[in-house]
């Protein structure tokens, strides 16, 4: 499953109404930690393609959505399941730590 770019208009449909868990990556092009974690997120999107939807929100282009989601730093990863926020974390993290984060809804 390809990683989708999400905005205020499709957040409800793609994230909150999703039939499978969703990992939302809030990022910005100028953010070095965001760029460092991006390849790992892409790898996990492929690995869990049938179990997890992965989407990205460019906070520079979607300031209103970032504010409404209460972001205080980026990268911020939010994990939704059945429309509910079940976990969130900020900053760059190693692959094992990210997989442990995802295991909250994948097991």
Image (cartoon, grey):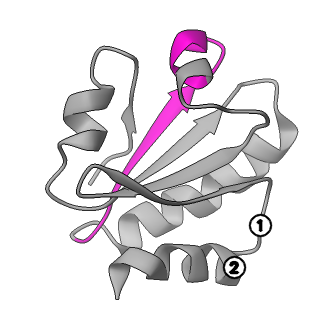
Instruction: Identify the magenta region.
Output: 51-66
The answer to which image quadrant residue 25 occupies is top right
Q: Which residue is mark 1?
A: 93
Residue 71's disc number: none
Q: Residue furthest left?
A: 19
- Residue drawn at the location 21% of the way across and 69% of the way down: 50
- Residue drawn at the location 76% of the way across and 74% of the way down: 94
Q: Report x, y in % for residue 73.
A: 79, 36
Q: Report x, y in % for residue 82.
A: 23, 57
In the image, residue 55 lies in the stretch drawn in magenta: yes
Q: Report x, y in % for residue 32.
A: 85, 39
**Can you say whether 40 is above or below 71 in the image?**
below
Q: Residue furthest bottom?
A: 107
The answer to which image quadrant residue 11 occupies is top left
Label 1, label 2: how many angstroms apart (C-alpha)?
Answer: 6 Å
Mark 2 lies on a secondary structure that is helix
Q: Nearer the viewer, residue 7 or 17?
A: 17
**Crowding at mark 1 (Cα within 10 Å: few <14, some 14-19, many 20+):** some
| Disc 1 and disc 2 in contact, CB within 8 angstroms | yes
Q: Which residue is mark 2?
A: 97
The answer to which image quadrant residue 80 occupies is bottom left
- Residue drawn at the location 74% of the way across and 42% of the way down: 34
Count numbered badges in the picture.
2
């Amino acid at each position: 499953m390809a990683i989708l770019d999400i905005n205020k208009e499709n957040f409800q449909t793609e994230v909150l109404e999703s039939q499978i868990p969703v990992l939302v990556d809030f990022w910005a092009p100028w953010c070095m930690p965001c760029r460092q974690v991006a390849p790992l997120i892409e790898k996990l999107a492929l690995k869990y393609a049938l179990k997890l939807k992965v989407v990205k929100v460019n906070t520079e282009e979607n300031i209103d959505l970032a504010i409404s989601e209460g972001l205080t730093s980026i990268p911020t990863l939010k994990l939704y399941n059945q429309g509910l926020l079940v976990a969130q974390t900020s900053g760059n993290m190693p692959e094992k730590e990210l997989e442990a984060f995802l295991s909250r809804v994948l097991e």
